[in-house]
Amino acid sequence: MKKNIIFIIILLLILITSAIIILTKNKPIKGFTITSIKYFSFGESGGFSMYNGTSYKIEYKDNKYITTILPSKTPDENKIETEISKSEVDKVIDVLNKNNVSKWDGFDKSDNDVLDGNSFSLSLTTQDDKKIEAHGYMKWPENYSKVESELDDIFMDIFIKNGGKQGE
């Protein structure tokens, strides 16, 4: 009788351990440090009025970083595409890391009671193929306002430095 109880306990421990391994094996990486950017996209929209969205992109191509910037209240034809320095990319990476944006991965929340609200979308792929995808409509992840504000500062500096014309 004692042998049967011990056998059952050991069997249960093996089953529980196996279940834990299987369930955690395919979980996405959360909370990693971003060290590089292959592709980055951040966009936000404030309702359905004309030119009421912001779009920032960085792509690493041919050993160069290319950014595309379309600020809010700016017609599509006034967006800029320009090469940026590694130090400018590092500023974006610093903002993302200090605000734990990698923990945003999988964020996908919305407030369906709001018909003309604000939304955001963030997509990042590192050069070692780690990914972050986050989306929201009238719901935001932790530190969202800080990230949005600091990204606005960085990208608007680049936009103005490269002759961008907002709102024309």
Image (spheres, grey):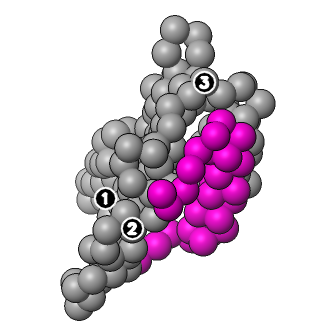
Quick check: is 99 in the magenta stretch?
no
Say which of 118 and 19 sits in front: 118
Name the disc covering residue 52, or none: 2
Say which of 148 and 21 sits in front: 148
| Location of mark 3 (residue) | 83
Magenta region, main secondary structure: helix
Residue 168 in the figure: left or right of residue 17: right
Question: Is residue 103 at all visible to an observer of this figure?
Answer: no
Among the two numbered marks 3 and 1 on one chain, the one whose residue lies closer to the N terminus: 1
Assess disc 3: are there few (<14), some (14-19) or many (≥20) residues with their C-alpha within 10 Å of its C-alpha: some
Q: Where does the image place residue 7, in percent across and percent down from the top left?
A: 30, 49
Residue occupying image coordinates x 34% and y 40%: 26
Residue occupying image coordinates x 65% and y 52%: 156
Q: Which residues are magenta?
A: 139-168
Q: CA distance from mark 3 to mark 1?
A: 69 Å
Q: Secondary structure at mark 1?
A: helix
Eyeballing the image, is 31 above or below 116? above
Q: Where does the image place residue 46, in percent across and percent down from the top left?
A: 39, 73
